[in-house]
Image: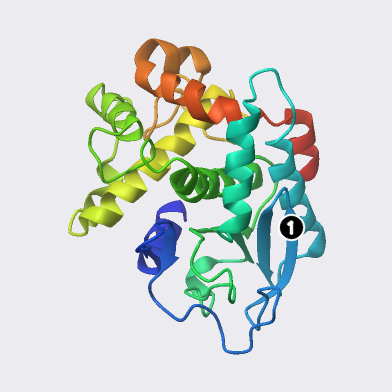
């Protein structure tokens, strides 16, 4: 299911011109029936949490949408490591650039209008979907993964474009990812089918890497159901073997430095008991 959704997303997204970001290239900015707040006939529900607009399709329960907002809020609590100017820059960018998160329900392969966006002024500053489709660890993993995609591949990319430039092989993000690939700890074989589109390929590789990196630094692999059950890959899984902060420090020091320089200064580690209670 994860790979199916990924390839569906590839058909929707391409790097926006000019101001950058992630845009939906498969369809219009939004249905012609759009409202001033960005909702429309596809995305009928909207909440705003810590400057992030979260749009949901009509079949998403209001309680689930609320809990997605609470999960995002839990990533932006006060902590000793937060750099206030950097967080303010991130929050300001999220707001001024109309970054948003899509939320859907059910099987993405059967959902119509998957290429629809929220309406103007939001349009194209989004990446993939969170789907209301399970419970427990499966649902926690779904929510955290796609919130982190939005945070890093859109929010960080727009806020810190030099560091998070996935097209620059010498950017801090790309070098950290390459270190994990070269060590055999980040297995990118599942993405080989994207190599015909270099921009999409690099964007997805870095997006997934940043997600795995932060999830490991938060020590959330077990909570999000991302540890291989057979124990074949240590603390991780077949795609990303480094499932603990100590693994990142020891085997992906460039990734740990990236985390310390950016993610740790903007994001707080969400309380596990809260996250489990939101998605039981």
Q: Quadrant of the C terminus?
A: top right
Image height of 152 relative to 201, above or below:
above
Q: Residue at x 41, y 42 (%)?
A: 208
Image height of 228 relative to 31, above or below:
above
- The figure's colour scheme reads rainbow
Image spot of residue 38 (x, y percent): 65, 74
Q: Residue at x 64, y 58 (%)?
A: 133
Image height of 114 relative to 269, above or below:
below
Q: Is residue 129 shown to the viewer in this render?
A: yes
**In this rendering, would 176 be left or right of 9?**
left
* Residue that carries the numbered disc 1 in the rendered image: 48
Q: Is residue 220 shown to the viewer in this render?
A: no
User: For the view shown, which residue lies furthest in the left direction?
Assistant: 196
User: For the view shown, which residue lies furthest in the bottom direction?
Assistant: 32
**In this rendering, would 53 be left or right of 192?**
right
Image spot of residue 161 (x, y percent): 40, 43
Q: Residues within 10 Å of mark 1 (few under 14, many from 20)?
A: some
Image spot of residue 223 (x, y percent): 64, 31
* Quarter occupied by residue 118: bottom right
Q: How many marks?
A: 1
Image spot of residue 202 (x, y percent): 28, 47
Q: Residue at x 66, y 81 (%)?
A: 40
**Dot 1 lies on which element?**
strand
Image height of 42 relative to 109, above or below:
below
Depth check, front residue: 71 or 104: 71
């Amino acid at each position: 299911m994860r790979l199916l959704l990924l390839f569906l997303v590839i058909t929707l997204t391409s790097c926006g011109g000019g101001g950058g970001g992630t845009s939906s290239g498969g369809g219009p900015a939004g249905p012609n029936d759009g409202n001033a707040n960005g909702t429309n006939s596809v995305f009928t529900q909207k909440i705003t949490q810590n400057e992030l607009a979260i749009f949901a399709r009509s079949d998403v329960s209001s309680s689930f949408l609320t809990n997605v907002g609470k999960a995002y809020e839990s990533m932006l609590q006060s902590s000793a490591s937060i750099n206030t100017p950097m967080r303010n820059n991130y929050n300001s960018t999220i707001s001024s650039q109309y970054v948003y998160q899509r939320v859907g329900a059910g099987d993405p392969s059967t959902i119509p209008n998957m290429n629809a966006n929220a309406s103007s002024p939001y349009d194209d500053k989004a990446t993939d979907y969170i789907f209301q489709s399970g419970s427990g660890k499966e649902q926690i993993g779904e929510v955290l993964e796609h919130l982190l995609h939005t945070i890093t591949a859109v929010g960080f990319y727009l806020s810190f474009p030099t560091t998070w430039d996935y097209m620059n092989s010498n950017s801090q993000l790309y070098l950290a990812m390459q270190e994990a690939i070269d060590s055999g700890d980040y297995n990118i074989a599942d993405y080989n089918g994207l190599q015909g589109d270099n921009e999409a390929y690099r964007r997805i590789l870095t997006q997934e890497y940043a997600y795995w990196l932060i999830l490991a630094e938060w020590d959330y692999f077990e909570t999000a159901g991302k540890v291989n059950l057979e124990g074949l890959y240590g603390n991780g899984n077949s795609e990303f073997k480094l499932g603990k902060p100590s693994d990142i420090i020891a085997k992906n020091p460039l990734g740990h430095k990236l985390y310390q320089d950016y993610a740790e200064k903007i994001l707080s580690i969400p309380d596990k008991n809260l996250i489990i209670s939101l998605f039981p």
